[in-house]
Amino acid sequence: MRVLLAALALLLPLSLPAADKPRVVTSFSILADLTQEIGGEHIVLTNLVGPEEDAHHFEPSPDHVRSLLEADLVVANGLGFEPWLERLLASSEARGKRINASQGVVPLQVQEDGETVSDPHAWQSLSNAELYVRNIAKALSEVDPANAKTYASNRDAYLTKLHTLLKTANQRTATLPASQRKVVTSHDAFGYLGQAWQLEFLAPVGLSTTDEPSAAEVAALIRQLRTEGARAVFVDNIQDPRLIEQIAEEAGARVGGTLYSDALASEGPPSTYLGMFQHNLDTLLAALKP
Ligand SMILES: [Zn+2]
């Protein structure tokens, strides 16, 4: 009898929804890592913008479009970070659940070209990352209630690690003198990190990497660095380092290393979100310590 039922079940795959793992699509590498941590073996994950890639401008392939159409859940950042995804979802028949992992974040408002815009790089604060993790765990539980308990325990285990890193970050940044808190990065991706630990980030390129700074803007930044002094200048992992190297040279500042802004590394410690955060913290503090 049992054999017969098993055979029937094979003929009727629709009657076995539990055997189908939820298909989840994430928009970029940081969300992919957080979602995989919570979903573990219970989800099938497809990520769109990979490690070391720039999510500000992205051309989705036909395979990417297909994965969006088939997704049970699409996890995006929101806050205007993925305009290409908005367009794609609006023009497609995608029916899966859609969430913005940044939901609940208090957006940092930035002046750009005379307009007030929200800074999308909210994952650069660990407190915001906690909101991301909670939102992702909640959405996974909604599309796959059978595994809700596992998602909740994976979430709690991850948050324990995140809280440990947050505590160290608070302790280590607290010791920096006020004069050592000014840094320059390639594009304006570290506003939330600056807000959390009272660091002032200056950048020649705006919130999106699509903005090209004018020669006058670059010259103004170099003048500002010469007069106010910046401890260090950092390149970021998704952009051409040449502009930053030129600024450092002309301002008499040194390049303090690479910060991971909008994408994880392909390998090594910064290939996970917590590893990336630790790397950025270590790199910043090594350059800023008196
Ligand atoms: Zn960015």
Image: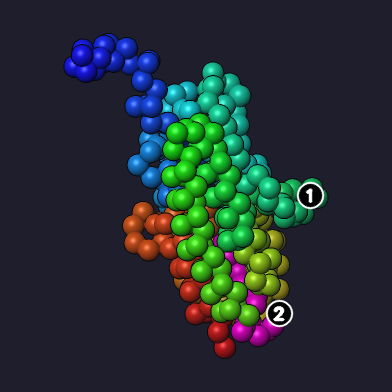
Magenta extent: 175-187
Q: Residue furthest bottom?
A: 290
Q: Indicate the secondary structure of the residue bearing disc 1.
A: strand
Report x, y in % for residue 233: 56, 72
Three-letter code, disc 2: Glu
Does any portion of residue 181 appear in the rendered image?
A: yes
Front residue of 195/252: it is 195
Report x, y in % for residue 120: 64, 49
Checking the image for residue 185, the label placed there is none
Q: Which corner quadrant holds the N terminus? A: top left
Q: Residue at x 47, y 43 (%)?
A: 149
Q: Residue at x 47, y 63 (%)?
A: 161
Does any portion of residue 77 appear in the rendered image?
A: no
Distance from label 2 to label 1 (Cα)? Answer: 26 Å
* Quarter location, residue 111: bottom right
Q: Which corner quadrant holds the C terminus? A: bottom right
